[in-house]
Image: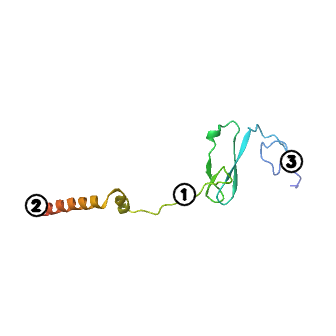
Amino acid sequence: MASGGSAIRGSRVGAGPMGEQDRGFHAERVAVSYWDAMGNETVRYFAADLPEDEIPEVIDSPSTGLPAGRDKDNPPQVAKNEPYKTHLAYVKERRTPEEAAELLEEALQKLRSAEGRG
């Protein structure tokens, strides 16, 4: 078999003529820049006819994972992560020490009366 130059070698089936520039209709679009707290810019493209209120104000920066906003001078800050709270910590937020003492006394009375019956 002779190794000749094949016209289709390295081409995709249905790719059309080499160097074809027209690959279909290109919709009008608008570029929107976002900046994170480290100064990184991320550009996102949206349809030009998309209403302004549907373009997000904040996105996650793909390079840092930080929130990125549209205002270069005031990028969004990272929300402070609250430490893990135990169930007891949440209960203490809802109850005053007086309420806790009253509930404890009621529970102890129920236990004492149950022990007296048994």
Q: Nearer the viewer, residue 112 or 93?
A: 93
| Residue where numbered disc 2 is placed | 117
Q: SS of the residue at dot 1?
A: loop
Which residue shows up at 21% across the image and 60% down it?
A: 107
Q: Horizontal and vertical percent for residue 48?
A: 71, 38
Q: How many marks?
A: 3
Tell me which amino acid carries mark 3.
Ala
| Residue where numbered disc 3 is placed | 7
Label 2 neighbourhood size at 10 Å, few (<14), some (14-19), many (20+)?
Answer: few
Q: Horizontal and vertical percent for residue 53?
A: 62, 39
Q: Where is residue 94, by image quadrant?
A: bottom left
> In this picture, is 89 found above or below 31?
below
Which residue shows up at 53% across the image and 60% down it?
A: 80
Front disc: 3 or 2: 2
Q: Nearer the viewer, residue 110 or 1?
A: 110
| Residue where numbered disc 1 is placed | 79
Which quadrant does the N terminus fall into?
bottom right
Tell me which amino acid carries mark 2.
Arg
Q: CA distance from mark 3 to mark 1?
A: 58 Å
